[in-house]
Image (cartoon, helix red, strand yellow):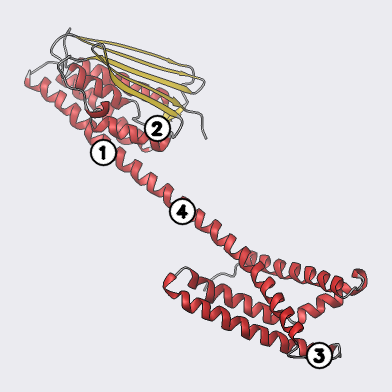
Amino acid sequence: MARINWIRIGYHLLFWIAYLFFNGLVVCVMEGQKINSFLLPAMYREAYSLPVKLAFTYFIFYYVIPLYLDRSKLAILVLMSVVSFAIATLLYRVQLWGYFTYVEPRSYAFFGAQGVILCVFDLYITITSAVIIKMIKLRYKSQEVEERLISEKLQSELSFLRAQTNPHFLFNTLNNLFVLARKKSDKTADAIMMLSKIMRFVLYECRAPRIAVADEAKVIRDYIELEKLRYNQRLTVDYQEVIDNPHASISPLLLLPFVENSFKHGAGATTGDVIIRILLTLENNQLKFQVHNTVDSDVEPAPNGTGGIGLKNVKRQLDLLYPSQHSLSIGRDNGMYKADLQVNLNEQ
Protein backbone atom coordinates (compact mmCIF):
# COMPACT_ATOMS: atom_id res chain seq x y z
CA MET A 1 0.00 0.00 0.00
CA ALA A 2 1.41 3.36 -1.04
CA ARG A 3 2.19 5.81 1.73
CA ILE A 4 0.26 9.06 1.85
CA ASN A 5 2.49 12.00 1.05
CA TRP A 6 1.20 14.52 3.58
CA ILE A 7 3.78 17.14 2.62
CA ARG A 8 2.58 17.08 -0.97
CA ILE A 9 -1.05 17.28 0.17
CA GLY A 10 -0.12 20.22 2.40
CA TYR A 11 1.44 22.09 -0.54
CA HIS A 12 -1.71 21.55 -2.61
CA LEU A 13 -3.92 22.80 0.25
CA LEU A 14 -1.77 25.91 0.64
CA PHE A 15 -2.08 26.60 -3.09
CA TRP A 16 -5.88 26.41 -3.07
CA ILE A 17 -6.21 28.46 0.13
CA ALA A 18 -3.99 31.14 -1.40
CA TYR A 19 -6.05 30.89 -4.59
CA LEU A 20 -9.31 31.50 -2.70
CA PHE A 21 -7.77 34.42 -0.82
CA PHE A 22 -6.50 36.23 -3.93
CA ASN A 23 -9.70 35.52 -5.87
CA GLY A 24 -11.68 36.92 -2.96
CA LEU A 25 -9.61 40.10 -3.13
CA VAL A 26 -10.27 40.34 -6.87
CA VAL A 27 -14.06 39.99 -6.32
CA CYS A 28 -13.97 42.73 -3.67
CA VAL A 29 -12.18 45.08 -6.05
CA MET A 30 -14.42 44.25 -9.05
CA GLU A 31 -17.64 44.75 -7.09
CA GLY A 32 -16.39 47.80 -5.19
CA GLN A 33 -16.83 46.17 -1.76
CA LYS A 34 -14.81 46.77 1.37
CA ILE A 35 -12.23 44.07 1.88
CA ASN A 36 -12.57 43.86 5.67
CA SER A 37 -16.31 43.17 5.46
CA PHE A 38 -16.71 41.38 2.12
CA LEU A 39 -13.55 39.23 1.82
CA LEU A 40 -14.96 36.17 3.61
CA PRO A 41 -18.28 36.15 1.65
CA ALA A 42 -16.28 36.58 -1.54
CA MET A 43 -14.02 33.64 -0.60
CA TYR A 44 -17.11 31.57 0.21
CA ARG A 45 -18.55 32.35 -3.21
CA GLU A 46 -15.30 31.28 -4.82
CA ALA A 47 -15.21 28.11 -2.72
CA TYR A 48 -18.70 27.25 -4.01
CA SER A 49 -17.29 26.89 -7.54
CA LEU A 50 -14.03 25.31 -6.40
CA PRO A 51 -15.03 21.63 -6.99
CA VAL A 52 -15.26 22.23 -10.75
CA LYS A 53 -11.88 23.94 -10.80
CA LEU A 54 -10.35 21.15 -8.72
CA ALA A 55 -11.70 18.45 -11.03
CA PHE A 56 -10.63 20.38 -14.14
CA THR A 57 -7.14 21.12 -12.79
CA TYR A 58 -6.34 17.59 -11.66
CA PHE A 59 -7.76 16.12 -14.84
CA ILE A 60 -5.31 18.29 -16.77
CA PHE A 61 -2.51 17.31 -14.37
CA TYR A 62 -2.91 13.54 -14.50
CA TYR A 63 -4.50 12.86 -17.88
CA VAL A 64 -3.57 15.69 -20.26
CA ILE A 65 -0.05 16.77 -19.22
CA PRO A 66 1.34 13.18 -19.48
CA LEU A 67 0.24 13.22 -23.13
CA TYR A 68 2.50 16.24 -23.66
CA LEU A 69 5.50 13.93 -23.24
CA ASP A 70 4.28 11.70 -26.07
CA ARG A 71 4.47 13.71 -29.29
CA SER A 72 2.54 11.04 -31.19
CA LYS A 73 -0.58 11.87 -29.15
CA LEU A 74 -0.61 15.60 -29.80
CA ALA A 75 -4.03 15.50 -31.48
CA ILE A 76 -5.53 13.64 -28.50
CA LEU A 77 -3.96 16.18 -26.16
CA VAL A 78 -5.54 19.12 -27.99
CA LEU A 79 -8.93 17.38 -28.21
CA MET A 80 -8.98 16.45 -24.52
CA SER A 81 -7.93 19.97 -23.53
CA VAL A 82 -10.69 21.62 -25.58
CA VAL A 83 -13.40 19.18 -24.51
CA SER A 84 -12.47 19.31 -20.82
CA PHE A 85 -12.35 23.12 -20.96
CA ALA A 86 -15.83 23.25 -22.51
CA ILE A 87 -17.27 20.82 -19.94
CA ALA A 88 -15.62 22.70 -17.08
CA THR A 89 -17.07 25.98 -18.35
CA LEU A 90 -20.57 24.45 -18.54
CA LEU A 91 -20.34 22.98 -15.02
CA TYR A 92 -18.94 26.28 -13.72
CA ARG A 93 -22.02 28.09 -15.08
CA VAL A 94 -24.31 25.48 -13.48
CA GLN A 95 -22.68 25.99 -10.10
CA LEU A 96 -22.95 29.77 -10.38
CA TRP A 97 -26.62 29.40 -11.36
CA GLY A 98 -27.21 27.31 -8.22
CA TYR A 99 -25.37 29.83 -6.06
CA PHE A 100 -27.23 32.87 -7.38
CA THR A 101 -30.55 30.97 -7.26
CA TYR A 102 -30.45 29.46 -3.77
CA VAL A 103 -27.60 31.03 -1.78
CA GLU A 104 -27.53 34.63 -2.91
CA PRO A 105 -30.67 35.09 -5.03
CA ARG A 106 -30.27 37.48 -7.92
CA SER A 107 -30.97 37.60 -11.63
CA TYR A 108 -28.65 35.30 -13.55
CA ALA A 109 -28.29 34.92 -17.33
CA PHE A 110 -27.03 31.37 -17.83
CA PHE A 111 -25.90 31.96 -21.43
CA GLY A 112 -24.98 35.62 -20.99
CA ALA A 113 -21.95 36.42 -23.16
CA GLN A 114 -20.22 38.48 -20.46
CA GLY A 115 -20.72 35.81 -17.82
CA VAL A 116 -19.45 33.01 -20.08
CA ILE A 117 -16.36 35.02 -21.00
CA LEU A 118 -15.64 35.69 -17.32
CA CYS A 119 -16.00 31.98 -16.52
CA VAL A 120 -13.64 31.03 -19.35
CA PHE A 121 -11.14 33.65 -18.24
CA ASP A 122 -11.39 32.52 -14.60
CA LEU A 123 -10.81 28.88 -15.55
CA TYR A 124 -7.94 29.86 -17.81
CA ILE A 125 -6.21 31.83 -15.03
CA THR A 126 -6.75 28.96 -12.60
CA ILE A 127 -5.40 26.22 -14.81
CA THR A 128 -2.52 28.38 -16.06
CA SER A 129 -1.37 29.17 -12.53
CA ALA A 130 -1.54 25.53 -11.48
CA VAL A 131 0.10 24.20 -14.65
CA ILE A 132 2.97 26.71 -14.43
CA ILE A 133 3.76 25.50 -10.91
CA LYS A 134 3.41 21.88 -12.08
CA MET A 135 5.72 22.39 -15.07
CA ILE A 136 8.32 24.17 -12.93
CA LYS A 137 8.27 21.22 -10.54
CA LEU A 138 8.58 18.75 -13.42
CA ARG A 139 11.46 20.77 -14.84
CA TYR A 140 13.37 20.72 -11.55
CA LYS A 141 12.69 17.01 -11.16
CA SER A 142 13.89 16.40 -14.71
CA GLN A 143 17.07 18.35 -13.98
CA GLU A 144 17.68 16.27 -10.85
CA VAL A 145 17.25 13.04 -12.81
CA GLU A 146 19.50 14.33 -15.58
CA GLU A 147 22.21 15.38 -13.12
CA ARG A 148 22.00 12.01 -11.37
CA LEU A 149 22.32 10.15 -14.67
CA ILE A 150 25.30 12.28 -15.68
CA SER A 151 26.93 11.65 -12.30
CA GLU A 152 26.33 7.91 -12.60
CA LYS A 153 27.74 7.92 -16.13
CA LEU A 154 30.86 9.76 -14.99
CA GLN A 155 31.32 7.38 -12.07
CA SER A 156 30.95 4.41 -14.41
CA GLU A 157 33.52 5.89 -16.78
CA LEU A 158 35.93 6.58 -13.91
CA SER A 159 35.51 3.03 -12.65
CA PHE A 160 36.19 1.72 -16.14
CA LEU A 161 39.31 3.88 -16.51
CA ARG A 162 40.67 2.75 -13.17
CA ALA A 163 39.85 -0.86 -13.94
CA GLN A 164 41.80 -0.42 -17.16
CA THR A 165 44.75 1.27 -15.47
CA ASN A 166 45.35 -1.40 -12.81
CA PRO A 167 45.86 -4.38 -15.19
CA HIS A 168 47.92 -2.14 -17.50
CA PHE A 169 50.19 -1.21 -14.60
CA LEU A 170 50.47 -4.83 -13.47
CA PHE A 171 51.27 -5.99 -17.02
CA ASN A 172 54.16 -3.54 -17.37
CA THR A 173 55.54 -4.38 -13.94
CA LEU A 174 55.41 -8.12 -14.59
CA ASN A 175 57.42 -7.53 -17.75
CA ASN A 176 60.11 -5.97 -15.58
CA LEU A 177 60.07 -8.98 -13.27
CA PHE A 178 60.33 -11.25 -16.29
CA VAL A 179 63.53 -9.50 -17.34
CA LEU A 180 65.04 -9.99 -13.86
CA ALA A 181 63.97 -13.62 -13.79
CA ARG A 182 65.56 -14.30 -17.17
CA LYS A 183 68.81 -12.83 -15.90
CA LYS A 184 68.44 -15.02 -12.81
CA SER A 185 69.07 -11.88 -10.81
CA ASP A 186 69.40 -12.07 -7.05
CA LYS A 187 67.11 -9.02 -6.93
CA THR A 188 64.09 -10.96 -8.22
CA ALA A 189 62.81 -11.86 -4.76
CA ASP A 190 63.14 -8.24 -3.59
CA ALA A 191 61.35 -7.07 -6.71
CA ILE A 192 58.45 -9.48 -6.09
CA MET A 193 58.16 -8.22 -2.50
CA MET A 194 58.08 -4.59 -3.66
CA LEU A 195 55.53 -5.44 -6.32
CA SER A 196 53.40 -7.13 -3.66
CA LYS A 197 53.39 -3.93 -1.59
CA ILE A 198 52.45 -1.83 -4.59
CA MET A 199 49.69 -4.19 -5.69
CA ARG A 200 48.26 -4.24 -2.16
CA PHE A 201 48.02 -0.47 -2.41
CA VAL A 202 46.48 -0.63 -5.89
CA LEU A 203 43.91 -3.27 -4.98
CA TYR A 204 42.81 -2.03 -1.55
CA GLU A 205 43.80 1.59 -0.93
CA CYS A 206 42.72 2.79 -4.36
CA ARG A 207 39.10 1.77 -3.87
CA ALA A 208 38.46 5.11 -2.18
CA PRO A 209 37.61 8.05 -4.45
CA ARG A 210 40.35 10.10 -2.78
CA ILE A 211 43.58 9.27 -0.95
CA ALA A 212 46.18 11.37 0.83
CA VAL A 213 48.88 12.93 -1.33
CA ALA A 214 51.43 11.38 1.04
CA ASP A 215 50.12 7.89 0.15
CA GLU A 216 50.38 8.63 -3.56
CA ALA A 217 53.93 9.88 -3.03
CA LYS A 218 54.85 6.72 -1.11
CA VAL A 219 53.71 4.39 -3.89
CA ILE A 220 55.71 6.50 -6.36
CA ARG A 221 58.84 6.05 -4.23
CA ASP A 222 58.18 2.30 -3.97
CA TYR A 223 57.73 2.06 -7.72
CA ILE A 224 60.99 3.93 -8.32
CA GLU A 225 62.84 1.50 -6.03
CA LEU A 226 61.26 -1.42 -7.88
CA GLU A 227 62.38 -0.08 -11.24
CA LYS A 228 65.90 0.60 -10.01
CA LEU A 229 66.36 -3.11 -9.44
CA ARG A 230 66.04 -3.71 -13.17
CA TYR A 231 68.58 -1.16 -14.40
CA ASN A 232 72.25 -0.81 -13.61
CA GLN A 233 74.45 2.23 -13.35
CA ARG A 234 73.12 3.69 -16.60
CA LEU A 235 69.97 4.87 -14.80
CA THR A 236 69.93 7.99 -12.64
CA VAL A 237 66.71 8.93 -10.86
CA ASP A 238 66.40 12.30 -9.15
CA TYR A 239 63.21 12.31 -7.08
CA GLN A 240 62.26 15.27 -4.90
CA GLU A 241 59.10 16.14 -3.06
CA VAL A 242 57.98 19.18 -1.09
CA ILE A 243 54.57 18.66 0.55
CA ASP A 244 53.20 21.16 3.03
CA ASN A 245 50.00 19.17 3.72
CA PRO A 246 50.45 15.37 3.49
CA HIS A 247 46.75 14.84 4.23
CA ALA A 248 45.51 16.78 1.20
CA SER A 249 43.36 14.44 -0.91
CA ILE A 250 43.85 13.43 -4.51
CA SER A 251 42.38 10.84 -6.83
CA PRO A 252 44.36 7.59 -6.47
CA LEU A 253 46.93 6.57 -9.09
CA LEU A 254 46.69 9.92 -10.81
CA LEU A 255 50.45 10.57 -10.73
CA LEU A 256 51.96 7.09 -10.93
CA PRO A 257 51.27 6.57 -14.69
CA PHE A 258 53.55 9.52 -15.49
CA VAL A 259 56.38 7.86 -13.56
CA GLU A 260 55.63 4.49 -15.14
CA ASN A 261 55.68 6.10 -18.56
CA SER A 262 59.09 7.69 -17.91
CA PHE A 263 60.62 4.29 -17.16
CA LYS A 264 58.86 2.46 -19.97
CA HIS A 265 59.61 4.98 -22.74
CA GLY A 266 62.75 6.41 -21.15
CA ALA A 267 64.89 3.73 -19.56
CA GLY A 268 63.13 0.88 -21.33
CA ALA A 269 63.38 2.39 -24.82
CA THR A 270 66.82 3.99 -24.50
CA THR A 271 70.12 2.20 -24.97
CA GLY A 272 72.46 4.71 -23.33
CA ASP A 273 72.52 6.46 -19.99
CA VAL A 274 69.14 7.56 -18.74
CA ILE A 275 68.21 10.43 -16.44
CA ILE A 276 64.77 10.68 -14.87
CA ARG A 277 63.90 13.77 -12.86
CA ILE A 278 60.72 13.78 -10.79
CA LEU A 279 59.55 16.74 -8.75
CA LEU A 280 56.40 16.68 -6.62
CA THR A 281 55.39 19.85 -4.82
CA LEU A 282 52.24 20.75 -2.93
CA GLU A 283 51.79 24.24 -1.54
CA ASN A 284 48.45 25.71 -0.50
CA ASN A 285 46.63 22.81 -2.18
CA GLN A 286 48.31 23.63 -5.49
CA LEU A 287 49.97 20.45 -6.72
CA LYS A 288 52.76 20.52 -9.29
CA PHE A 289 54.17 17.31 -10.69
CA GLN A 290 57.03 17.23 -13.19
CA VAL A 291 58.44 14.08 -14.78
CA HIS A 292 61.33 14.57 -17.23
CA ASN A 293 63.31 11.74 -18.79
CA THR A 294 65.90 11.40 -21.53
CA VAL A 295 64.88 9.76 -24.80
CA ASP A 296 66.78 8.71 -27.89
CA SER A 297 66.54 11.25 -30.68
CA ASP A 298 65.61 8.54 -33.21
CA VAL A 299 62.60 7.38 -31.19
CA GLU A 300 59.38 8.64 -32.72
CA PRO A 301 57.12 10.47 -30.25
CA ALA A 302 53.66 9.13 -29.53
CA PRO A 303 50.77 10.71 -31.49
CA ASN A 304 49.82 14.07 -29.99
CA GLY A 305 52.38 13.45 -27.26
CA THR A 306 49.85 11.48 -25.25
CA GLY A 307 51.86 8.32 -24.60
CA GLY A 308 50.24 4.93 -24.06
CA ILE A 309 46.97 3.81 -22.55
CA GLY A 310 48.08 4.85 -19.05
CA LEU A 311 48.51 8.53 -19.91
CA LYS A 312 45.35 8.57 -22.03
CA ASN A 313 43.37 7.29 -19.08
CA VAL A 314 44.97 9.83 -16.75
CA LYS A 315 44.12 12.69 -19.12
CA ARG A 316 40.50 11.57 -19.22
CA GLN A 317 40.37 11.21 -15.43
CA LEU A 318 41.76 14.73 -15.06
CA ASP A 319 39.04 16.04 -17.37
CA LEU A 320 36.36 14.27 -15.32
CA LEU A 321 37.68 14.90 -11.81
CA TYR A 322 39.33 18.30 -12.12
CA PRO A 323 37.64 20.17 -14.96
CA SER A 324 39.08 23.68 -15.30
CA GLN A 325 41.24 22.90 -12.26
CA HIS A 326 44.27 21.42 -13.96
CA SER A 327 46.77 21.97 -16.74
CA LEU A 328 48.86 19.30 -18.42
CA SER A 329 51.76 19.78 -20.78
CA ILE A 330 53.40 16.81 -22.49
CA GLY A 331 56.12 17.00 -25.13
CA ARG A 332 59.79 16.65 -26.10
CA ASP A 333 62.48 19.28 -25.76
CA ASN A 334 66.25 18.96 -26.24
CA GLY A 335 66.34 15.20 -25.89
CA MET A 336 64.01 15.19 -22.87
CA TYR A 337 60.46 13.90 -22.66
CA LYS A 338 58.58 16.24 -20.32
CA ALA A 339 55.27 15.89 -18.54
CA ASP A 340 54.26 18.87 -16.41
CA LEU A 341 51.01 18.68 -14.44
CA GLN A 342 49.37 21.27 -12.21
CA VAL A 343 46.21 20.50 -10.23
CA ASN A 344 44.16 22.68 -7.90
CA LEU A 345 43.21 20.32 -5.06
CA ASN A 346 40.90 22.75 -3.32
CA GLU A 347 37.58 20.96 -2.69
CA GLN A 348 34.64 22.33 -4.68
Q: Can residue 9 be seen in this view?
A: no
Number of residues whose C-alpha sits closer than 10 Å to that of mark 2, classed few (under 14), some (14–19) or many (20 or more):
some
Q: Earlier in the sequence, mark 4 or mark 1?
A: 4
Q: Disc 3 designates what residue?
A: 108
What amino acid is found at the position of numbered circle 1 in the picture? Gln
Query: Residue at left 53%, top 58%?
Result: 141
Q: Disc 2 designates what residue?
A: 251
Mark 4 vs mark 1: in front: 4
Q: Distance between the residues labelled 4 and 1?
A: 27 Å
Q: Disc 1 designates what residue?
A: 164
Residue 184, x across and y down, in percent: 7, 18
Q: Disc 4 designates what residue?
A: 146
Q: Distance between the residues labelled 2 and 1?
A: 15 Å
Q: Which of marks 1 and 3 is nearer the N terminus?
A: 3
Q: Quadrant of residue 170?
A: top left
Query: Residue at left 90%, top 73%?
Result: 32
What amino acid is found at the position of numbered circle 4 in the picture? Glu
Residue 5, x across and y down, in percent: 60, 67
What amino acid is found at the position of numbered circle 3 in the picture? Tyr
What amino acid is found at the position of numbered circle 2 in the picture? Ser
